[in-house]
Image (cartoon, grey):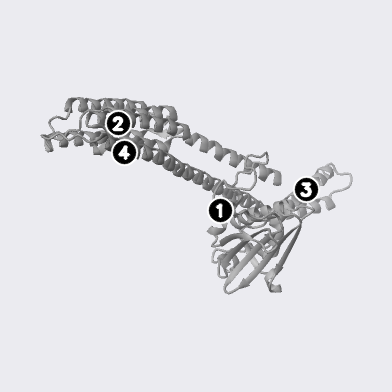
């Protein structure tokens, strides 16, 4: 069963990682097309307001409008391509965004180059690319944007200013170039990093939900097996009783005696099988809403990770707290499993768990005598893909253990604090309100199975 659980968890991790890689290679085509239509509409409005509203008659209107019309034709082609396929590959999306940068650079060149106050809109396609594309595509588009900025700084049409023509000094133009170049680098780098962090967080949350769903499914199957065994117990007992009576009454030389003996033996075998199913949930963790002593839960969770050279001790500030009962939920099991697994694996010789109940709070403290958390790790613990292990090792560690633990335990109302133990190792302190449903056995949805 433990091997099956490990295989299922590995399959979930691999499936989520594959899904994340697939999602990174796909760009929503409709979003790009809609953004381009908005940009085209804004360009047309700006050109006609400048020409007819501000009477900038020296504006090369026909050439500028032709540039916008080309963008509209390209977007019509993009709209046609996306029918029946709501997404596009990254290389195609990068090509469209490269065209957007070049088209905007051409329009800016016709209307005064970097002296045009609207030159900053040349960076808009780059910002869109940073939210959708992978790192190297963003780098290439950023280089293209800088090349376009440089060409506009070197040569461009005069800035349309109506009756009076104003010639700005080259120092001003190159100052604008420097500002927009730095803005291009900052926008590309910062936007890409934020978008990437958001995608990774969504992936980690998806894995947490899948892991929890798997635990609930295992618990549900175990509970169902126990319920079936319970319900079949009575009719099977009747069959066994009747078959034994028939066996007693059958003459020794009867032709049916061997068939009756086979029926009795098979009925006994069915009872043994059902008894094993009835015991299975207790072996694997029990009913998910069962109340059990807190120290027994800690022993159960830590059992798969125990090491011969590491001792696990459980104490309490008051003796009665060792017998304090807690609700046996998949969230609590998985959350504490990650904490205890890390403590046992990193410990040199001892792991100490303390149960404390005071001031209206229940506190669980896990300490080990291992190397502890580094200062650089403490500020990032709880974020996805953060681990002191090599996250690419053969064990398949992804740096999600603490993140999953924090997510699950926080969902149960727990507050988690990471720090240094007095012995120099790592310390994890988890606290819950004493009135939490975890420690309240009188829940309205609790049901007690009937016994026959």
Q: CA distance from mark 2 to mark 4?
A: 10 Å
Q: Quick one: label 4, few (<14), some, or many (20+) residues within 10 Å?
A: few
Residue most extreme to the right: 252
* In this view, 31 is above or below 312: above
Comparing labels 4 and 3, the label whose residue is closer to the camera: 4
Q: Is residue 163 left or right of residue 335?
A: left
Give the foreground label among 1 and 4.
Answer: 4
Q: Look at the numbered discs 2 and 3 and tell me whether their residues touch, using CB distance below 8 Å.
A: no
Q: Which residue is mark 4?
A: 175
Q: Report the residue at 26% width, 29% height from top.
A: 109
Choose the circle earlier in sequence order: 1 or 4: 4
Q: Earlier in the sequence, mark 2 or mark 4?
A: 2
Instruction: Report, in whole angstroms, how far the alpha carbon at label 1 lies from the one at label 4.
Output: 43 Å
Q: Which mark is residue 344?
A: none
Query: How far apart, in angstroms, are the residues tagged by discs 2 and 3?
Result: 89 Å
> Is the residue marked by circle 1 packed among few (<14), some (14-19), or many (20+) residues within 10 Å?
many
277 vs 405, nearest the viewer: 405
In the rendered image, which residue does mark 1 sit on?
382
Question: Which residue does the numbered mark 3 point to in the structure image?
Answer: 269
Q: Earlier in the sequence, mark 1 or mark 2?
A: 2
- Is label 2 in a helix, a strand or a loop? helix
Question: Of helix, strand and loop, which one carries label 3?
Answer: helix
The quadrant where residue 292 appears? bottom right
**Foreground disc of the pair 3, 1:** 1
Percent across and percent down for residue 11 are 61, 39
Pointer 2 local density, CA inside 10 Å: few below 14, some 14–19, many at least 20? many
Residue 107, given in percent of the width and then of the height, sits at: 25, 30
Q: Secondary structure at mark 1?
A: loop
Q: Is residue 58 visible?
A: yes
**Frontmost residue, 378 versus 7:** 378
């Amino acid at each position: 069963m433990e091997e099956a659980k490990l295989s299922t968890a590995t399959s979930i991790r691999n499936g989520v990682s594959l899904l994340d890689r697939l999602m990174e290679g796909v760009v929503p085509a409709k979003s790009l097309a809609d953004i381009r239509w908005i940009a085209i509409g804004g360009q047309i409005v700006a050109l006609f307001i400048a020409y007819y509203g501000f009477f900038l008659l020296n504006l090369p209107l026909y050439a500028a409008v032709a540039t916008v019309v080309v963008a509209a034709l390209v977007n019509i082609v993009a709209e046609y391509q996306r029918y029946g396929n709501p997404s596009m590959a990254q290389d195609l999306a990068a090509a469209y965004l490269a065209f957007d940068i070049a088209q905007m650079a051409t329009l800016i060149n016709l209307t005064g180059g970097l002296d045009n106050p609207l030159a900053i809109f040349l960076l808009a396609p780059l910002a869109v690319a940073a939210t959708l594309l992978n790192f190297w595509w963003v780098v290439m588009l950023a280089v293209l944007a800088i090349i376009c900025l440089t060409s506009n700084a070197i040569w461009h049409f005069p800035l349309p200013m109506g009756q009076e023509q104003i010639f700005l000094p080259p120092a001003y133009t190159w100052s604008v170039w420097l500002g927009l170049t730095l803005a291009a680098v900052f926008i590309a780098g910062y936007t890409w990093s934020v978008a990437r962090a958001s995608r990774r967080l969504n992936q980690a949350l998806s894995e947490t939900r899948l892991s929890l769903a798997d635990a609930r499914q295992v618990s549900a199957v175990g509970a169902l097996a126990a319920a079936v065994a319970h319900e079949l117990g009575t009719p099977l007992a009747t069959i066994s009783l009747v078959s034994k009576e028939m066996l007693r009454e059958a003459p020794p030389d009867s032709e049916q005696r061997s068939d009756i003996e086979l029926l009795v033996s098979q009925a006994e075998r069915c009872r043994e099988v059902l008894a094993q199913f009835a015991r299975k949930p207790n072996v694997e963790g029990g009913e998910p809403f069962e109340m059990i002593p807190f120290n027994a839960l800690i022993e159960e969770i830590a059992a798969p990770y125990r090491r011969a050279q590491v001792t696990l001790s459980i104490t309490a500030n008051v003796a009665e707290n060792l017998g304090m009962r807690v609700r046996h939920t998949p969230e609590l099991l998985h959350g504490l499993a990650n904490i205890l697994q890390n403590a046992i694996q990193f410990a040199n010789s001892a792991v100490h768990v303390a149960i404390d109940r005071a001031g209206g709070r229940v506190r669980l403290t896990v300490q080990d005598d291992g190397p502890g958390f580094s200062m650089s790790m403490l500020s990032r613990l709880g974020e996805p893909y953060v681990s002191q292990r090599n996250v690419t090792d053969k064990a398949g560690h992804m740096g999600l253990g603490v993140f999953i633990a924090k997510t699950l335990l926080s969902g149960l109302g727990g507050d988690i604090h990471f720090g240094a133990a007095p012995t120099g190792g790592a310390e994890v302190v988890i606290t819950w309100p004493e009135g939490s449903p975890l420690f309240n056995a009188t829940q309205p949805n609790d049901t007690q199975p009937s016994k026959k």
